[in-house]
Image (cartoon, rainbow, N blue to C red):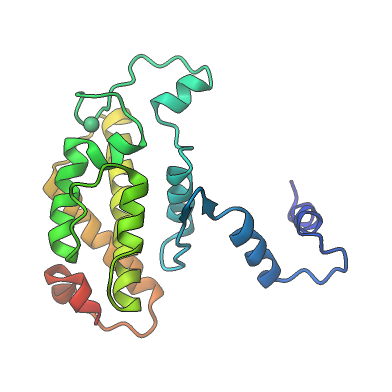
Amino acid sequence: MTPMFCIAKLELIIGDFSGDFTTESCRKWLDDNLLQVSDVEVNWLSWVPLTVRCFILRLLQHRLPLAPALRARGVDIPSGRCPLCLLEDENEDHTFVKCPVAKGVWCKISKWMNLNVSNIPSIMDLSNCINGAQGSRMAKRTRTLIGYCTCWMIWLTRNRWLFANTRASVEKMVEEIKILAYSWMDARRTKWHCTWEEWVLNPITGVG
Ligand SMILES: [Zn+2]
């Protein structure tokens, strides 16, 4: 599909036949039609890479290629067990929240960002807890970014474990989350003066 055809199709969807297609009208259409997942509103935080934002959207829509979704599409897979723990079948809630590996990561991340999300029963509850946490606008955005980064790291670790037989400890995952989240903050924030030492100590007080 060519870019011009994409724009033409988008204008058709938006209902703008005047040719006055704008970024704002596109953004409004996306917000109104794509970013509302059941009762949970996805925080389309621009500091997070687009790939990861799309991943979060698919996660909350239960559209990731986990075992139940693959089987529903007729894909023959040898096992539906969670590759991280091999204790239960995988699904969004288990892999990202209830799995012992995920719990271990969230436990350490909770202490680091001053928000306890280590005993949350589902991915939707996790999203609501992080988005509904008290604090300044900056603190809220930072926690959201860290939450997205943590889910992304769990996903990467699960895939490396499954497809490359590369394992990572909880401590290693947490270290990678801190580094990756800092790089996202550092790349997107123009007036941001949090040092790495402040960030590692406490990302919420570190960002001010
Ligand atoms: Zn597991």
Nearest the viewer among 107 and 23 is 107
Nearest the viewer among 153 and 127 is 127
Relative to 30, does residue 165 appear above or below in the rendering? above
From this viewpoint, which residue is outermost toward the front? Answer: 39
Relative to 208, does residue 91 appear above or below in the rendering? above
Q: Could you tell me if residue 195 is visible in this image?
A: no
Relative to 98, does residue 144 appear above or below in the rendering? below
Which residue appears at 48% of the width and 62% of the height? 44
Q: Classify the position of the C terminus by image quarter.
A: bottom left
Measured as percent of width and height from the top left, residue 203 is found at 20, 71
**Would you say 58 lies left or right of 12 here?**
left
Which residue appears at 12% of the width and 60% of the height? 111
Which residue appears at 14% of the width and 45% of the height? 104
**Would you say 125 lies left or right of 174 here?**
right
Measured as percent of width and height from the top left, residue 205 is found at 18, 77
**Would you say 154 lies left or right of 59 here?**
left
Relative to 55, does residue 72 appear above or below in the rendering? above
Measured as percent of width and height from the top left, residue 163 is found at 33, 29
Q: Could you tell me if residue 179 is visible in this image?
A: yes
From this viewpoint, which residue is outermost toward the right? Answer: 18
Q: How many marks?
A: 0
Which quadrant of the figure has residue 189? Answer: bottom left
Which residue appears at 29% of the width and 31% of the height? 164
Measured as percent of width and height from the top left, residue 157 is found at 27, 40
Q: Quadrant of ligand 1?
A: top left
